[in-house]
Image (spheres, rainbow, N blue to C red):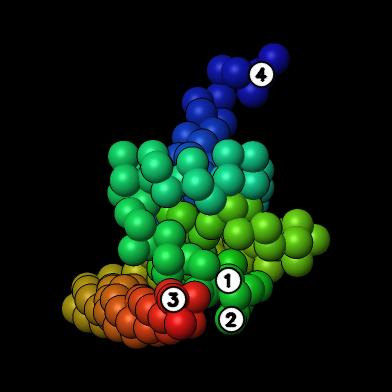
Amino acid sequence: MDFIRDYSYYGYLLVGLVIMLESMGLLLPAETMLIAASIYAASPNSGLSVHLIALSAIIGAIMGDNFGYLIGQKIGYHVLKKYGPKIKLTPERLLLGQYLFKHHGGKVVFIGRFMVLLRLFTALLAGANKMPWKGFMFYNALGGIAWAGGYSYVTYFLGKQILQLEGTIGLVLGVVGGVILLSFIWFIHKNEKRLIEHAQKEAEREAAELDHGLNT
């Protein structure tokens, strides 16, 4: 029972739990927590292992997406349409989800892991849109490993290198590395908005064309 007295295990549990709940559709700071935990693990005597942080994050991401998929599959599209707005899953986002899974399928599951809005609702929408579970599981695992593992190790090694250097060089490299990391996150989020707006317009156009076809 020594692991119970090792408080670091509660840290791993918290990281995995927050990421799992976010993957199920709850708006939580999972990405921020993962980055902060990985950077902290790089500090001397932190007591945290970046390998266990990455593992916890990967397990949380995969489990959360699978729970979200099952929930979406169980309650179905119509229930999501009725109650979705209570968790910010608006009719427009449901329409967007239908369009994305119809045209892109697994790519949405993988890429969605790196985009906040898609990360929240991808699993629910995959289940509601009846995406085959085997395909979902493959891209879900691939995305979870790339996102959780990538963010954990990149931020950890960045923090480690900064701590090993001293004086002006360490400060400059730390600032440069931080700017690069933040620029990457900013680029992802900026393009997320652009891509979602484009897909939203295409989804609305398809829906309008379908509605017109039914009325003629």
- What's the distance in space between the residues labelled 2 and 3, CA to CA? 24 Å
Closer to the camera, 146 or 204?
204
Closer to the camera, 213 or 100?
213
- The residue that appears at 35% across and 57% down in the rendered structure is 91
Question: Disc 4 marks which amino acid?
Answer: Asp
- What's the distance in space between the residues labelled 3 and 4, CA to CA? 69 Å
Q: Which residue is mark 1?
A: 101
Q: Which residue is mark 4?
A: 2
Nearer the camera: disc 3 or disc 1: 3
- The residue that appears at 66% across and 18% down in the rendered structure is 2
- What's the distance in space between the residues labelled 3 and 1, CA to CA? 25 Å
Q: In the image as oriented, which residue stretches furthest toward the top?
A: 1
- Callout 3: few (<14), some (14-19), or many (20+) C-alpha neighbours within 10 Å? few
Q: In the image as oriented, which residue stretches furthest toward the front?
A: 216
Q: Which residue is mark 3?
A: 215
2 or 4: tag closer to the N-terminus: 4
Nearer the camera: disc 2 or disc 3: 3
Picture coordinates of residue 135, whole percent (x, y): 75, 66
Nearer the camera: disc 2 or disc 4: 2
Labels 2 & 1 near each other (Cβ < 8 A): yes
3 or 1: tag closer to the N-terminus: 1
Labels 3 & 1 near each other (Cβ < 8 A): no
2 or 3: tag closer to the N-terminus: 2
1 or 4: tag closer to the N-terminus: 4
Badge 3 marks a residue whose secondary structure is helix
Question: Disc 1 marks which amino acid?
Answer: Phe
Picture coordinates of residue 88, whole percent (x, y): 31, 49
Q: Which residue is mark 2?
A: 103
Badge 2 marks a residue whose secondary structure is helix
